[in-house]
Image: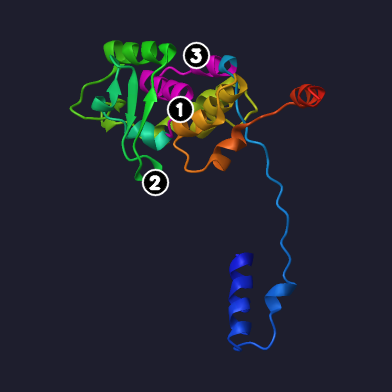
Amino acid sequence: MVIAFKSFYNFTTKKDYCPENVGKSIKFIPVHTKERTYISEIEFRKIIRNIKNPTVKAALQTIFYSGLRISEITNLKIGDVDIQNEILYVREGKGKKDRRIPINDKLKKILQDYIEKYRIDTGTKNFFSCRTGGISPTRINEVLRESIKSMGLEKHITPHILRHSFASNLLERGVDLFQVQKLLGHENIETTSIYLHISLEELEDAVNLL
């Protein structure tokens, strides 16, 4: 907004529509950016054990182990889950872009169990289904929120936090930032870099390399 205001008055003074560029007197206010919240795999397992709905449970596990957005989860079709070749196909994700996500061993077992034991065939093409058809983001959020509340956890945890956790946990284990960028479907590497959580001990180790 400030940039637009400054640009507007810069234009008006150049065209002599305005005698003075008042935009120059406006100062930018520095904004403090908070570090993104994320949870470990151990914390996630405790949460997921408390969720009884098998469809929501499998959907949340897929987010945590693949980094998919909640909209990509609810739009996932049966044909997008290739268990045999261990690939998830994201069709028209953010920015209308497609991408392929490898299915790791943990997620493979989760998806196989869901298909064999819990998936309800109601004629819908959606992979995650319920009796009324595909499951909604609202329902996923609702079940997760109820689970967190019943456990008495103080952390604010949402499906998007689980996506953050996927990225943060990979980076903590040494996965290249550019690889994580591809998995998340980010346009810019700067967006992915917010998932780097560097501790003081790690910074001390870094400077000691000198």
**In the displayed image of the protein, which residue is found farthest to the front?**
210
Which portion, as a residue range, is magenta?
43-69
The residue wearing badge 2 is: 95
For the residue marked with disc 1, what is the amino acid? Val
Q: Is residue 145 something one can see in this rendering?
A: no
Nearer to us: label 3 or label 2:
2
For the residue marked with disc 3, what is the amino acid? Arg
- Quarter of the picture holding the N terminus: bottom right
Judge from the rendering whether residue 170 lies leftward or rightward of residue 86; answer left or right.
Answer: right
**SS label for mark 1:** helix
Q: Is residue 31 something one can see in this rendering?
A: yes
Q: Position of residue 152 (x, y in %)?
A: 62, 23
Q: Earlier along the polypeptide chain: callout 2 or callout 1?
A: 2
Cα separation, mark 3 vs mark 1, equals 13 Å
For the residue marked with disc 2, what is the amino acid? Gly
The residue wearing badge 3 is: 49
Cα separation, mark 3 vs mark 2, equals 34 Å
- Quarter of the picture holding the C terminus: top right
Q: Where is residue 35 in the image (x, y as percent from the top left)?
A: 67, 37
**SS label for mark 2:** helix
Residue at (37, 10) in percent of width and height: 109
Judge from the rendering whether residue 99 lies leftward or rightward of residue 45; answer left or right.
Answer: left
Q: Which label number is shown at residue 143?
A: 1
